[in-house]
Image (spheres, grey):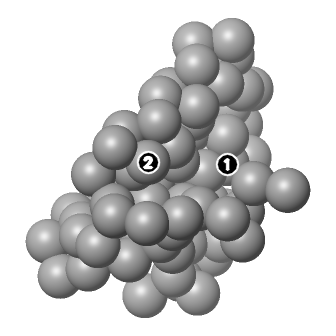
Amino acid sequence: MLSFLPVCNLFDFAAEHKQRIFEDLQKLYPNEPRTWDAVARKHLHKNVHDAVSDKDVLKFYSVYEEAIKKIPGDMLAEYVR
């Protein structure tokens, strides 16, 4: 599923598909580090027409903070170096 996200970012009409991918990821793989990473990064990787704002960056960090609280162990070690 994750491999389709960069393609969705290229096309405005794919926004609904992109949202569905994120919903499915969170429902099917809620304890997977890659799911949390993808959800966090969605705030930074918008479609080609949108700029990333300070608010988006704060959302990015807040998702990682939530993941650290919800996932046992050192699940983000591979992402935070």
Instruction: Look at 34% across and 43% down and name the residue there.
Output: 69
Of all residues, the one furthest to the left in this rendering is: 27
Mark positioned earlier in the residue sequence (1 or 2): 1
12 and 74: which is toward the camera: 74
Is residue 79 in view from this perspective? yes
Instruction: Look at 33% across and 61% down and name the residue there.
Output: 71
Of all residues, the one furthest to the front in this rendering is: 73
14 and 25: which is toward the camera: 25
**Is 48 drawn above or below residue 33 in the view shown?**
above
Cα distance between the residues tagged 1 and 2: 21 Å
Q: Secondary structure at mark 2?
A: helix
What kind of residue is marked 1?
His
Q: Nearer the viewer, mark 1 or mark 2?
A: 2
How many marks the image carries: the answer is: 2
Q: Which mark is residue 68?
A: 2
Instruction: Look at 38% across and 77% down and name the residue there.
Output: 32
21 and 13: which is toward the camera: 21
Q: Is residue 57 left or right of residue 8?
A: right
For the C terminus, give its image quadrant: bottom right
**Is 2 drawn above or below residue 44 in the view shown?**
below
Residue 5 horizontal/vertical position (percent): 55, 72
Residue 23: which quarter of the image? Answer: bottom left
In the rendered image, which residue does mark 1 sit on?
45
Q: Secondary structure at mark 1?
A: loop
Residue 22 horizontal/vertical position (percent): 32, 64
Q: Is residue 44 left or right of residue 29?
A: right
Residue 59 horizontal/vertical position (percent): 50, 26
**Is 42 drawn above or below residue 11 in the view shown?**
above
